[in-house]
Amino acid sequence: MKPIRELIKEKPWTGWLLFTLTAIIVFLLGLFASSIVERRSESMMLQQVKPINEWEPRNEVWGENYPREYETYLMTSDTTFFSKYAGNGHIDLLEKYPSMVILWAGYAFSRDYNQARGHYYSVEDVRKTLRTGVPQPATCWTCKSTDVPRLMSEMGVANFYKAKLTDLGAEVLNPIGCQDCHDPKTMNLRITRPALVEAFQRQGKDITKATHQEMRSLVCAQCHVEYYFKGEGKYLTFPWDDGISVEAMEKYYDEIEHVDFVHALSKAPIIKAQHPDWELAQFGIHAQRGVSCADCHMPYKSEGGVKFTSHHVVSPLKNISGSCQVCHRESEETLRQNVYDRQDKVRELLDIVENSLVKAHIEAKIAWDNGAKEEDMKPILKLIRQAQWRWDYVSASIGGAFHAPLECARILGNAIQKSELARNELTKLLIKLNVKLPIQYPDVSTKEKAQKYIGLDMQKLFKEKEEFLKTVVAEWDKKAKKNY
């Protein structure tokens, strides 16, 4: 048999044939190796140490089967990370932005509003906030605990919502975790909160048809969305029937004449935005290119040859190399600055709206105090409602300034226009009422001054909360020990 070199000299096409065959073999070997790694990962996932009950709420029990995921989940207890505007540690947002106290006058958020910490603290923070010092429905627990799917299964969904928050305190113990997003038998992602499924159904969509990649965002959309408590039964409902834009949701709320609270100063019927993170993200380039929440906030990791999803749910700014640089080739410093540039611009617009709205509420109060009539105030209060809804919609979203900066700027631009229109009408009315202009505004430059101006007795509220923790919460814990 002739050597290969001579054979190729005589018949050059044999060289190309050998090259092609070698490339195919290498490619197939690569696929085979990749398959081995993936199967190994899958086998590691599905080999449970012991079966997990259908509604098992304890994250540590799931952790016995999935230690890598559980260990990274426990990292959500770390509160040391802070970015320019947020992070996962304690930030008193009323201290940072005192205007919020005025904007929420007459509502519990004016008492206490902090930067959300990690999922690990979801139950503890509800117990401690001054906002639960007023009667609240059990609906408030819906997104705070893995005990909720179990309770809904036992009580029925409507009965769960109808209960009082304090009625279920001894049952809601485990913070947000595994049960919220996973089927315990298959570990497939699943929706455990009915409000998202019901919102899809009302739009003619079947959420069971969602792809795995879509589910990596939809499990977050169970909670990180706009919602309200419908009717006397306080039934958790997403206002998506007309669409997920800020205007579509406003139309929905206007048609049912929904009011979260009447403003204590202006008497405007206010809609309080929750945290429309998923909706705003859909207007951003990442979601439009198919990037899921988990891709950036829970990136894949590799350990001991096993690929798994990090359950350290956190801002990608804490892990730029593991999140952003999977796709982007710029330096960490450049990518971080790209985020801050967008957040800076949205923050600038938020400040303008807040300053305008605070003045509008105070001017409306002065108009009422000087004999303004209902028919004169009605169109003005409607403009204030519209402006505040738009401001709150952007302000309350956790990552909107980065997820969809253009949409945020559009919404805030409209908020400025509506707030200033309200102030123009107020100026005309104040002149008609013979009020001396310009208005002398009160000093509300700090949280303490603002809370005092709207009549909050904070010392009394702190004492009441201290007593609540010593008595009511202590009794919850005592009962809980008997159950476990």
Image: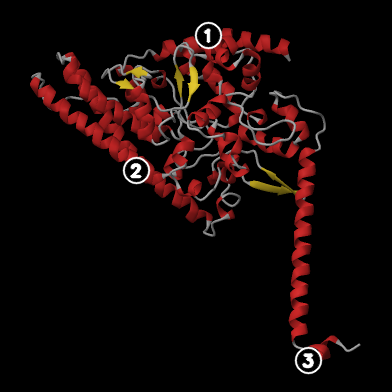
Q: Amino acid at mark 1?
A: Glu
Q: Which is more N-terminal, label 3 or label 2?
A: 3
Between circles 2 and 1, the one closer to the viewer is 2
Q: Which is more N-terminal, label 1 or label 2?
A: 2
Mark 1: give few (<14), some (14-19) or many (20+) Cα within 10 Å: few
Asked where in the image residue 88 lies, by quadrant, the reply is top right
Q: Which is more N-terminal, label 3 or label 1?
A: 3
Asked where in the image residue 81 lies, by quadrant, the reply is top right
Q: Residue at x 53, y 46 (%)?
A: 317
Name the residue carrying label 1. Answer: 467
Between circles 1 and 3, the one closer to the viewer is 3
Q: From the viewer's perspective, is residue 314 above or below residue 133?
A: below
SS at badge 1: helix
Name the residue carrying label 3. Answer: 9
Q: Is residue 469 visible?
A: yes
Mark 3: give few (<14), some (14-19) or many (20+) Cα within 10 Å: few
Q: Amino acid at mark 2?
A: Ala
Which of the pair 208/165 is nearer the observer? Answer: 208
Name the residue carrying label 2. Answer: 409
Label count reads: 3
